[in-house]
Amino acid sequence: MSNVAVIVAAGSSRRMGFDKLTAELAGLPVLAHSLLAFERCAEVDVIVLVAASERVQGFRSLAAENGITKLKEVVAGGEQRCVSVLHGIQAAVKEMPAAKIILVHDGARPLVSGEAISHCIQGAQKHGAASLARRVTDTLKRADDAVLVTESVERENLWRMETPQAFEADLILKASRAALDDLVVVTDEVSAVQHFDEGQPIFLVENSTANLKITVPGDLAIAEALLNSEERNI
């Protein structure tokens, strides 16, 4: 039984103002931290990286410089996330036709733990699909177009979706193709699977450790503090 991780790193970093994936975090590029998490996870056999076309060679070098031996392919992404993910999944299936589980992870989430990756794989093996997630604890409000509050939103049973998200290989390949063919805008792979098969169970793996997505410059300082905290060093 083989598992392949597709790391999506084809974004433009527009909100960041500079390339967040190569920004230094605790002495290594952000993307290196993400790759190393899957490199060190025993359940992951192969890594496929999706990059913007102009960064394919640069990211190959980055991976080699940081000892990523499981990386088998770096493929060019597309203008939309769904296109990039499909390219990665297709490459994953090509590299390992017998793959059982395919994980999809945002390259800009460098704090993901090996334990979380393992639990997502186990959830997908049991249910067919699983995602790392976090319970919503904030008070939620809905507003109108004038940004005036219209109502409160009950937070019970609400979750923030994270990555990795893990799926049976055939399921995520078909779901990703269907979303693209049907011109459905999806912001994560769980949404693609829900569009393809509304009855497919999605198991949520509750995450108890930090797994923020680097989006704005201040996130780098937060991530570095977390990496240096006692929690991350246990």
Image (spheres, rainbow, N blue to C red):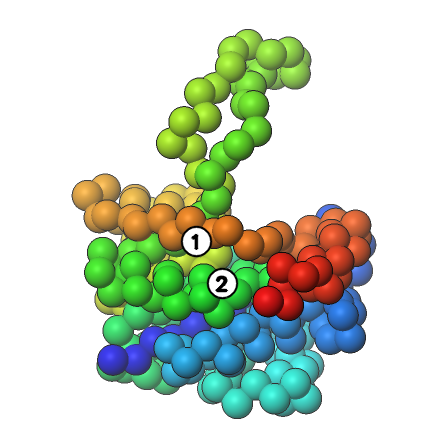
**Quarter of the view holding residue 155:** top left
Residue 162 image offset from top left, x and y in percent: 49, 51
Check the picture and name the quadrant holding the N terminus: bottom left
In the drawing, does residue 144 fall left or right of residue 16? left
Density class for disc 2 (Cα within 10 Å; few <14, some 14-19, many ≥20) is: many
In the drawing, does residue 216 fall left or right of residue 80? right
Residue 68 image offset from top left, x and y in percent: 57, 85
- Residue 135 in view (yes/no): yes
Residue 87 image offset from top left, x and y in percent: 44, 69
- Residue 57 in view (yes/no): no
Mark 2 → mark 1, Cα distance in angstroms: 10 Å
| Residue type beneath disc 1 | Leu
The residue positioned 62% from the left and 59% from the top of the image is 231
Check the picture and name the quadrant holding the C terminus: bottom right
> Which residue in the protein does label 2 denote?
105
Provide the secondary structure element on which disc 1 rests.
strand
Badge 2 or badge 1: first in the primary sequence = 2
Residue depth check, mark 2 versus mark 1: number of the one nearer the observer: 1
The residue positioned 75% from the left and 58% from the top of the image is 225
The residue positioned 73% from the left and 75% from the top of the image is 28
| Residue type beneath disc 2 | His
* Closer-to-camera residue (114/197): 114
The residue positioned 52% from the left and 90% from the top of the image is 69
* Closer-to-camera residue (101/180): 101
> Which residue in the protein does label 1 denote?
132
